[in-house]
Image: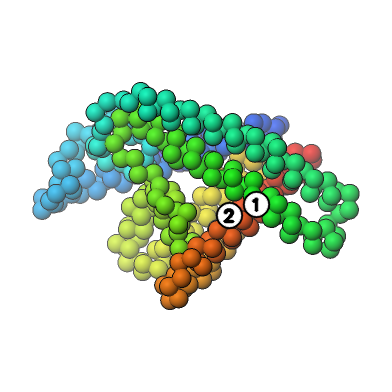
Amino acid sequence: ICFWFTIATCLLWEGGKGGGNILLNVNLHMLSVIGVLKLISYAHTNADLRRGGPNATGPAKAMIEQYPGNITLGNMAYFMLVPTLCYQPSYPRSKKIRKHWLLRRLAEFLICCAVLMFLVEQYVEPTISNTLDMAGSRGFSMKFLMSMGPRILKLSIPTLYCWLVLFYGFFHAWLNILAELLQFGDREFYKDWWNAPSIAQYWRTWNIPVHTWAVRHLYVPLVNRGVSKQGALMLVFLFSAILHEVIISVPLHMFRLYAFSGMLLQAPLIVITDFIHKRLRREDISNMFFWFFFCFLGQPLGLFLYWQDYLNASKS
């Protein structure tokens, strides 16, 4: 696992010193991170199966009975391909591949890619470039900094559209394409995160594969080792912040801690939105907090900062 992740990271970092394709770097690094998380789950789950007790019942007993017959190259290869991060000896399977349904998902994925490219080229890139040109001609004066607010809000709408298109294209179209081709039956990749009454609820619903992996292989083992539930939750959140920073920093070949800081700054927002949701019983207000701070402020600001630093690094 360490070898896999280290080699991919070093190749991407060294390759970027002379330029490189950002999109290719991001995809390669994402595959590297996904592979690492899958291998960790594979090792942990099989270790649990080896320690499985004779008093196990239900689904746990059924999985224990499959061990060690599940330790095959075919079984591992199937797990590495299916759209899930948590290993188990067998998965629910669909009876056949629905060709017409598959073609619809493929068309949706291609349309999402085209719309995403259009939004970036026509709205996101010109807005950021104009802002950077202003900074270059006037410098980062107080007047320029005061004008940043409207520009961030102007950037927030196309950034939100990009986020929604990217989410639909990946989680609904692409993951379902993989699942259909592999006849993978578990299709719960996300829940209704757009209705999240708090930031914490959003993180539990927008990416079910990662959330399930974090609960099974981080949160539960930490609690079983005596860590308090609150402490385990904070450690999982810290791991997520580090992972987000690594996923962004390595493909861009720069280390800025914007993603890491943005994740940690969500901790007080989690407390605020949970208070509004649970104490004041106002899901509408806490949902408005989520949309404003996460989608209309956090994403465009983070995109602007990384874009600016990447262009400056490329010029130098």
> Considering only vertical position in the picture, is 275 above or below 19?
below
Viewer-proximal residue among 108 and 83: 108
Q: Residue at x 41, y 67 (%)?
A: 231
Image check: 275 left or right of 246? left
Q: Is 190 situated above or below 20? A: below
- Whether residues under marks 1 and 2 lie with C-beta atoms below 8 angstroms apart, the answer is yes
User: What residue is disc 2 on?
Assistant: 295
Picture residue at 36% right of the left edge, 69% below the top: 228
Q: Which of these two is toward me, 138 or 33? A: 138
Residue situated furthest bottom in the rendering? 279
Identify residue for label 1: 156
Q: Amino acid at mark 1?
A: Ser
Going by the image, does 48 lie left or right of 218?
left
Circle 1 SS class: helix
The residue drawn where x is 32% and y is 26% is 98
Location of the N terminus (image quadrant): top left
